[in-house]
Amino acid sequence: MSKVLVIGAGGVGSVAVHKMAMNPDIFSDIHLASRTVSKCEAIAESVKSRTGVTIGTYAIDADDVEATSALIRQIGPELVVNLALPYQDLAIMDACLATGVNYMDTANYEPKDVAKFEYHWQWAYQERFKEAGLTALLGSGFDPGVTSVFAMWLKKHRLKTIRLLDILDCNGGDHGQAFATNFNPEINIREVTAPARHWENGQFVETPAMAHKQAFDFEAVGPKNMYMMYHEELESLAKFLPEMERGRFWMTFGDEYIKHLTVLQNVGMTRIDPVLYNGVEIIPLQFLKAVLPEPSSLGATTKGKTNIGDIATGEALDGSGEKTFYIKNICDHEEAFEETGNQAVSYTTGVPAMVGAAMLLTGKWAGEGVFNMEQFDPDPFLAMLGEQGLPWSVEELAEPLPF
């Protein structure tokens, strides 16, 4: 039975807090903080009506280390779960070090002024967390998060080595909007418009954004176009799977999304540098975020499924030669909304956030320092993930991907 502080009241924070409340044997005392306390209060009301659990709510500017430290001291949690923006990771880690509390997040740090997310800023905290006797768990979402654990489960149970790895992220949901993003628009668009990078022969190879497209038939969704992108788990997987010859990340986008995004790029609305408007500096992408639909509002209208998983090829553990396995989860938007009031993109990140927190609080994952998901035993995490609404399956494929 543990006290936890969750920072961030978007869709992911909402799912995580709902699922924590559904597991009171682990999460006995839940607190939620955000810059906008009314968002916390709305989530708390939903949690109360669905589970009967009361959670504490607070206003906090997570960029302010002193204010965050004061809130942590006031609450006294065993763990701070950072579900805020990735710009705030380092500030929250600093607050955890200042207060002697364990830390966890779902996405690695990214500076506000450069669309570049890398682990080196957070890996640099290794000695500080180790000396403090604290644990920092990075990237406990779905991708990153579950996709890394999937790879390590295959490495433990099916493959002696992983030579080729492809992560396939398909959102087959339809929210009925002309253009909207299923998670934070600012983060989503920065991610999609950044140059693609994939791991090949010991180095990252950079290519233009959205330059590589492949069609793939996803179970429970159907044929979709997917585009090669850079995603942060490639960095940690390249580190913890040193034998990997090639690692790629793919995400599906519909033609309408691509069309709208192309126009927005062409007219400068995806810029992250300031422009002067009526004597005031504004960031075009931040303004665009303000006028796009709030992702948490899409749950009631989104129908369809997500399908996210890994396809890995390598030397089989049983000595039968090289084999290819596909390990994945399929999640239904409407079922996710019925359970938590959020669509499946938030659900598939919020549930692993809760499970990662449970691993730390129950001692199933433990250590002093900064850790990625690949460094812990995949079995207890995936066992709980399946029990908590994200069942997964694994199958052997006849051959590696043909592209």
Image: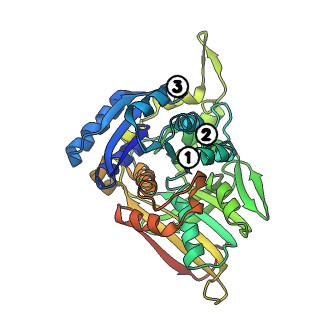
First of labels 2, 1 by sequence position = 1
Q: x, y percentage for residue 380?
A: 45, 67
Q: Residue at x 35, y 45 (%)?
A: 17
**Which amino acid is tagged 2?**
Arg
Identify the image quadrant of residue 37: top left
**Which amino acid is tagged 3?**
Glu
Quadrant (top left, top right, bottom left, bottom right) of the C terminus: bottom right
Q: What residue would you read off at disc 2?
A: 190
Question: Badges 3 and 1: C-beta atoms under 8 Å apart?
Answer: no
Work out whether residue 209 or residue 267 is closer to the camera in this orientation and state it: 209
Q: CA distance from mark 2 to mark 3?
A: 29 Å
Q: Residue at x 22, y 47 (%)?
A: 50
Query: Which of the two marks, 3 or 1, is nearer to us in this view?
Result: 3
Label 2 element class: helix
Work out whether residue 203 or residue 44 is closer to the camera in this orientation and state it: 44
Label 3 element class: helix
Q: CA distance from mark 3 to mark 1?
A: 22 Å
Query: Which of the two marks, 2 or 1, is nearer to us in this view?
Result: 1
Query: Which of the two marks, 2 or 3, is nearer to us in this view?
Result: 3
Q: Residues within 10 Å of mark 1 (few under 14, many from 20)?
A: many
First of labels 2, 3 by sequence position = 3
Q: Residues within 10 Å of mark 3 (few under 14, many from 20)?
A: some
Q: x, y percentage for residue 141?
A: 49, 53
Q: x, y percentage for residue 134?
A: 54, 47
Q: What residue would you read off at disc 3?
A: 66
Label 1 element class: loop
Q: Is residue 380 left or right of residue 49?
A: right
Q: What residue would you read off at disc 1?
A: 107
Q: Is residue 206 left or right of residue 343?
A: right
Mark number displayed over residue 60: none
